[in-house]
Every structure is written in structure tokens, then in C-alpha cells.
Image (spheres, rainbow, N blue to C red):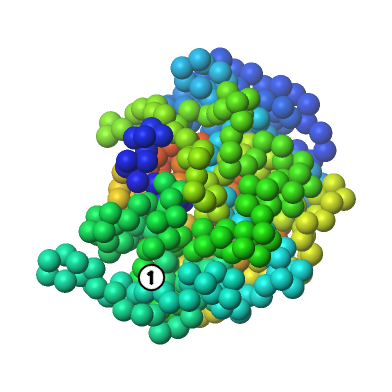
Amino acid sequence: MDHLTRRTMLQRGGMLGAILALDTVSPALARTTAAGSSVRFKAIDAALREGVSKNDVAGVIAVAATPKGIVYEGAFGKANVATGAPMTLDTVFWLLSMTKAFTAMACMQLIEQGRLHLDDDAAKYLPELASPQVLDGFAKDGTPRLRPARRAIKVRHLLTHTSGYTYSIWSEALTRYEKATGMPDIATCKNAAFTAPLEFEPGERWEYGISMDWVGKLVEAVSDQSLEIYFRENIFAPLGMKDSGFLIGTGQKRRLATFHNRGADGGLEPAPFEMPQRPEFFMGGGGAFSTPRDYMAFLQALLNGGTLHGVRILRPATVAMMMQNQIGELNVQAMRSAQPSYSRSFDQFPEQPHKWGLSFDINTQPGPNGRSAGSIAWAGLLNCYFWLDPVKHITGALFTQVLPFFDERIVALYGEFERGLYHGLDLA
């Protein structure tokens, strides 16, 4: 759920074994592709198809897997509303904050290799983090007041969103700071965005922000490679993720899903959107694109303890650590929207405390739609969502391209997908 400014938007504008049936409905409404659906997943098909017919989404894709492989794949509606091109499993989506899981994996690979450590001072690798400033309110004339931080920022703080860095979408104070100083939004991919102050002392609380963008810088500094190359060589190529990256190719652009804004009347308004393609830095917190098939390969590797198709990219112990509480007595807090056109207020589990691992939200009690306590999850600003249940051994993801984030209609579809999956697999 990455922080996109209005200016940026205006400028850029789960059947065990093989399932072979192809389920096609009216091309104007929906199309289920690839593996299709079996009887056990009719509820998912019906829900997603209805979501398209009611204009909750122009198009939607849902994919799920167990350790035995893909168990559901469904693609409904249109990828391109202008040409009428249908959604397919190779449709390209901007991931926004679902990029963060790639960046966390890259960092954990370097930690496995002993090239950095969770409790190192981040400034050991990034000198610009040696003297962080904390935003301490505003003077009467609106000038920001800053003071030196009393604690060092650790690598762990950056990986767990306890560093003090925030996003202005969910921060009135940082929104005001940006207006007062002219500091660019992180989504512009301009290095000046890293001049943002902290809003609290490192380790003091959890608050979502640009920490994973700093982790991207950290990976580049330690590996001496750009994130584009590091991801390609150490994550994407080993996992066969041929349609993932920061720099989108011509063929991929032709398969790009149309971005929509939800209008005041509930309708969907198509608009141009693209992450910067001549960035000053690769945005480890939210700049990547991928396809549902590619992203599911990544999730399968995590589900399988760091291995897919005989290729190991992380050790099982490392993956397990990523899925464990890494913030101690702190809790993940509700993200209160400061910019409603980009995001509604967000809390995946409003009736229970939840924790944070190494780039994942962790529900401490069973979820309402089937997932076990101890499952991990996150999302992307354009209403893409995923979860991984290490107890029942299932992972699923849902892809759309709509603002504002945490859209009620899409969240409801996500819940129906999850419920249908657990019921279809007799895991409920």
C-alpha cells in the first residue's frame, strides 16, 4: 500500500491435482482461464463473476496453491476496458506494496550469507541514516520543528516498520510536512523523498511507512547491485518469474491491467497509471510489477519453506523467522487515512491484536474467512491482496487495480475467495 501523490497519479495518470475444464461466460462479463474451476470451487467463480457483473471490478484474478501445487486459478472480466481484452493469468499488475515481500526476501538472503545482521545499525551500510531527525511538531508559521533522534535505526526496525518512518497517506503530520517543505512523495522515485523525518523514536511503536524503501537501498549497498538486477538474478530467474520487475517491457505493457478510480457514485473510472520508468532509485517498497502466475510462484516458494521446483532461495529456518512476531509487545496499529482519495482507513483484523514479522502482518487469532492464527498477509495499494497460512498449508492472492485502497466491494470479494477456498479444500 504505497504512498502515491495526486500529482503522480495525474501524471501517470486456487482442486488438488490438475483441473482441466475451461469455464467461459459472456466475454463482456468474465472469463476463467488456464486451470479453470472444479465443482468444489463454484462459490469462488460465482462470487468473482458477480463482482464483475455488478461493476465492483472491471476485472479480477484469484490464484491459490498448496504444497502440491496450484489448486485454483480464476480470471474474470476485462484487463483492458478500451480494447475489451480479457483478464488472463499473464495479465500484468502493478504490485505497489506487494513489492515489499521481494525486498524482504532479498534482505534475508543477505542475512543468511552473513553480509548484514538484523541488529546492526542501518547506518553501518547507509551513512545517510547516521543522524535521523524526528518531526517534533510545527511552529506557528507552519515551519516543521525537528530534533535529533535519541536512538539508532537498526536493520530490524526497517524490516518491521518500527523505524519511525511513515507514509503521508496515513499520517496527517507527514502530509503537512510534505506541503510545508515541498518534499516529493516516495512514489515519484526521487531520492529527495528520503529526506523525510521520523515521526517517533526507532523501536517505539509500529507505523507503516517508507522503511522498506530504505531496505531496498540497503540491499543495493550490500550487494553492490541495483534492485532490478538483484531481484532478477536472485529471486525472479530462479523461480521462473519472467514477467516481474521494475522496468516494464513493451510486451508486458500490452498485457497491463487497466487502472481505475472508484467514483463517488460507486462506478469505476479508467485512468492512466504507470510507476516511474526512469527512477532515481528502484522503489523496494512499491515499484514492481508482476503477473498472478509469477507472484504465486513467489508465494509457493515461501509456503514450501524457501524452495520451488527443486530450487532453494531461502532456508526453511529463515522463512519461519519471517513469519514470526518480530515486534515483541508492540502491536500493528490501524492505519487511519489522511488522504481518502488514495486509501480508506485500514485494519485487516480490527477485533484482535496482530503482529508483524519480517515484512508480513500476522493475525494472532483465526481469521473470519478460514485462515489459521499465525497466518501472514499483506496487500498493494491498488487493491491487490495475499495471505499464506502455514498451519493449513495454503496461500492465495487476489489481483485488481483500483483506488482507493481497501475498497469495501473488493475486500468483500477477497473474503469470499478465501472462504470458498477453505470450504472447497475441506479446510474450514
Q: Where on the picture, by quarter, is residue 341?
A: top left
Which residue is depicted at the point 37% across and 41% down?
Answer: 8
Q: Is residue 25 above or below residue 241?
A: above
Q: Percent x, y for residue 38? A: 72, 31
Q: Where on the picture, by quarter, is residue 126?
A: bottom right
Q: Is residue 124 above or below residue 107?
A: below
Q: Percent x, y for residue 210? A: 46, 60
Task: Check disc 1: other Cα within 10 Å, few if <14, some if 14-19, many if 20+.
Answer: many
Find disc 1 in the rendering and name its residue. 198
Which residue is depicted at the point 48% across and 28% down?
Answer: 258
Give whichever of 297, 246 is nearer the camera: 246
Which residue is depicted at the point 52% across and 46% down?
Answer: 287
Q: Percent x, y for residue 223? A: 68, 61
Q: Is residue 327 left or right of residue 18?
A: left
Q: Is residue 420 left or right of residue 172?
A: right
Which residue is depicted at the point 69% across and 52% down?
Answer: 230
- Tag 1, which secondary structure? loop
Amino acid type for the residue under numbered disc 1: Leu
Give whichever of 53, 336 is nearer the camera: 336
Residue 418 visible to an observer of this rendering: no
